[in-house]
Amino acid sequence: MSPLAEVKTTRRGLFKAAAMAAAGAAGSGLLGGLAPARADAKGLAAIPFESKFSVCDMCFNRCGMIARVQDGVVVKLDPNPKFTKSRGMLCARGNAGVAQVYDPDRLRHPLLRDGARGEGKWKRISWDEALDIAAEKMRQVREKYTPSGQLFTAGADMQSEFVSRFAEVFGSFNITSHESLCLLSLNRAFLDTFGEAPYADVINSKYIVMAGANRFEALVTPDSIDLMDAMQRGCKLVVLDPRHTKTAALASEWHAIRPGTDLAFMLAVAHVIIAEKLYDPKFITEKTFGFDELAAHVASYPPAFAEAQCGIPAADVARIARELAAAAPASMVYPGRRSSDYVNSSQIRRGYAIVNALLGNWDKPGGLLAARQVGLSPVPADPPWYDDNQEDRLDAEMSPMLFEHDGSFVHTRDAVLAGEPYPVKGWFIFKTNPMQTAPNRKKTIRMMEAMDFVTVVDITMSDTAWYADLVLPAPSALERTDPCAGLQGSSACACVVKRDPVIEAMYESRPLFEIVKGLAARLDLAEHFAFTIPEYRAKQLAKLNGAEAVLDRDGVYYNPGQVYGVYEGRIFKTKSHKIELYNQRYAELGIDPLPVYTPPSTVAEDSFRLVIGRNALVTQTSTQNNALLGRFVPDNDLWIHPDPAQRLGIRDGERVVVESKIGKGELAARVTRKIRPDTVYMLSGFGTLSGGLSRIKGKGASIAEIIEDAADALCGNAAMHETLVTVKRKVA
Amino acid sequence: MPGKQLAMVIDSSRCIDCKACMAACITANAVPAGYNRNWVKDAEPDLAKGAFRGHFQPGGCMHCDNPTCVAACPTGATFKSRDDGSVVIDRGLCIGCGNCIPACPYGARFRNPALRKADKCDYCAARRAQGLSPACVDTCPTKARVFGDLSDPDSEAARLLAENKGRLVRLVASGTDTKPNMYYLGATEPRNWPVEPAPPTAMAAMTGLVDPLVKAAVALSGLGVLAMFGRQLFTKPHPPHDGHDHTPDAQASPGKQAGSGGAERPDNRF
């Protein structure tokens, strides 16, 4: 008998005796406060859950979920198993939706600035007063500077379309979205190659090269989940990332590519596929335009070129090209999502698109899929004509390939500050936080200061709200009636979701729709909002018979349709009506019609390239103050390789100062081999200025304070990996 | 009628370490800040040696068939359910002595500071009573966690076990097989982290926490005196939890108290 077992035997006797003593004590009522807790299993079970469908609002994915409600309180959010886009899951952020609803830092009533901008002095006012002031300020801006003198900015929300509608009937060309701080370069590249931005059929793929994407951490549904399923079935995943992400940790291969050199890799892959004739000649002839030009172009980009640029051995580059081609068409270069990286990001992602074209994976299982018909009908506004207005967007001339509806935040900000081509003096912002998500925060503050009046609608006091004139409290997604939204996700779905309130709106919060309706009424635009959201939804669903009933029953409505082969007999929406390896429109505009490799700026010995990113517990700044998520990610730190750390005398956990040309931040160093020696990494979402986010005040450093403002030369998307920084040990 | 045998079958090769299971558990069970009923462990590759493949391992209370926590409980509050094979805490009987905490090789238990009672995974009993699966299982994006009744051959858990016979892994301390009901499929990592269950250090906690009347009652009994004597032999201070990862350090020496497993690896952050 081992000594431990002996002890156990001996002590078990003691426990039994002690148990009896305790039980006796309990029986005699001596224990008082130790009476059985009510919240035991049986106690909770006695209160049945009310279960209500909703749609998650913790990021852009909009996963279907079921809210469990007890006594009018949301106690738990669960995945809706019928929602195939998310494969019936709810991530940590989705679960933390409860903490968002009951965040004690939520805005409770309208607040009017009562001190200097950003000083944090506020006056509580009534809704009538708030809407009167906001409308009057907008009227003044319109009279003084034309309707386009008012800028509108909206984040990803199921009510954001009402901001667009309001901007349209107000008469302003100027509306920006979060997209120009995120995914536009990718969309630009694929639109200009395939005529549309595709969905990746990850689940059926046999070989995936993932560069500039971190799908196991920055979750995109269904791609993140499908990637795991595909890999379980033997799909090979090759990750190119300067950082050892969780995606890299789970990959078949990880190459710590030198940041900003992805295009060299893609061109070399194209080089091998073409030189070794690993493509489907029939597909190339029938479906693509400019193959010969491409072949001549990539001749000068052999694998050895990629090795020199990327730091990936030429033999590996060639092997990966061959393996991709061998698995084609069920293979892909994953397009990615956030592509706001470099000034040539559109061209970098064109490289991704071109390799996909050579793999012939368009419209095929395991390849890139075309968008499908969800079937929602648009509910167009009929905007009035304004004689006295500007000709176009403020930033129209600042990018040759601008997205009309998204604009460029970086360029718009420069134009506002310059007052050119015309003054913009009013700003209406709904649920987005450019103060923290756009590069160069000091400039965003100056932009705020350049405004006559800024109105922010949000659920908490974001940094952007903190610098506004008027802050209006919105309800959380669980408290609202929202329009229908159409969602797509590769082969998983083309579907419709809607939101109905799970609980009553809290505090004095009012949904965005009611706010713009109130403003419209005060600006003689009431007729454009003369409907309720249920009426609006009925119009959206006009062509989908019975959809509303299905939505009520299942929480999601699917519009089944063809997934593969939808381009059979159809032309591509490009100038040549084919997949444009060589982009003709670019040639006309003087843009490189084939992507020409430009090396990233040189990182000197004593500096680093700063790269940024997300993980599965953070959605930029919208989750930063969340009590539940804060338990996992209380602040951010700076990833730095042990070699430079040693050179700089920085030990793990020590405070460091990261400094660029425009700003600096102080945070803890995380000394780790998970990052290249020439690169440092920071998580977004920290280093806030707002005094209204009590949980994260003073935590971590802000990427917005450090990242310099550069923009994609084609579409004006922010370029957030261009910044070089120094890192120093914080001197106490 | 034979009882159920609830168990969790985990394919850790599917885990992406997204922490959805932990967030779901915290919300479903009102787990107080600083504590967790479940976890995801990270088998960090040695990048310095050129390795890069990582492995993430979800876990939680393993509802053992030979539960050392049950043996350590002085009141019978922690017991093995005859109905479903789970290890249950009856909060009405728990005196919050904390003996069970170091008695668990997995660091699966903690003292809930609000309730002053032992706390751990109960497979979401309240949810199950309403026909829902445990929150961690329900929410898991990649369905790495599968829960079910092994006595029902049609349950997914039983089916997975049957299909994977010969490649099932149960994580146990090197010296004590607690016969956990958490089965990992295939090559899961890390493996060497369960620690030897530590003998109770009950009375130190009891004297500090429990109603003085109880203390008096215990002290008056001869057995209580004996227990105090026993405590002298085995006691170690019982530091509070570090508030982050309630799993013992993977490198912990045998016999180290699970509850003191605050020594996180430097990279075990987010």
Image (cartoon, rainbow, N blue to C red):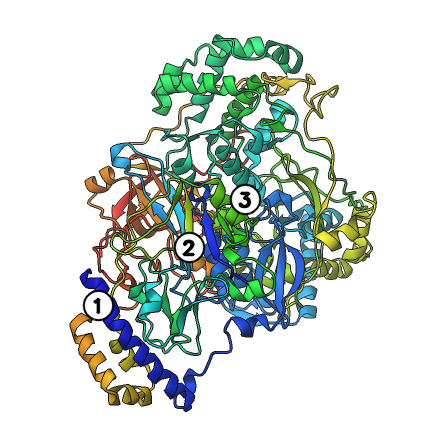
Label 3 is placed on what type of residue? Answer: Arg
Q: Quadrant of residue A420?
A: top right
x and y percent of residue B76 in the render? 38, 74
- State the residue at coordinates (41%, 18%): A319
Q: How many tags in the picture?
A: 3
Q: Nearer the viewer, mark 3 or mark 1?
A: 1
Quick check: can you spot residue A721? yes
x and y percent of residue B46 in the render? 27, 38
Element under disc 3:
helix
Residue A319 lies left or right of residue A333; in this view the side is left
Q: A527 or A311: nearer the eye?
A: A311
Chain bearing tag 2 is B
Element under disc 2:
loop
The label on residue B181 is 2
Label 1 is placed on what type of residue? Answer: Val
Mark pair 2, 1: CA separation? 25 Å
Residue situated furthest front in the rendering: B1
x and y percent of residue B78 in the render? 39, 70
- The residue pinned by badge 1 equals A7
Element under disc 1:
helix
Q: For the residue carrying disc 3, how many other residues have a C-alpha within 10 Å: few (<14), some (14-19), or many (20+)? A: some
x and y percent of residue A125 in the render? 62, 72
Residue B196 lies left or right of residue A443; in this view the side is left
Q: Quadrant of residue A328?
A: top right
The reply to whether label 3 and label 1 mark residues of one chain is yes
Mark pair 3, 1: CA separation? 73 Å
Residue A620 lies left or right of residue A46; in this view the side is left
Residue A280 lies left or right of residue A148; in this view the side is left
The label on residue A413 is 3
Mark pair 2, 3: CA separation? 59 Å
Chain bearing tag 3 is A
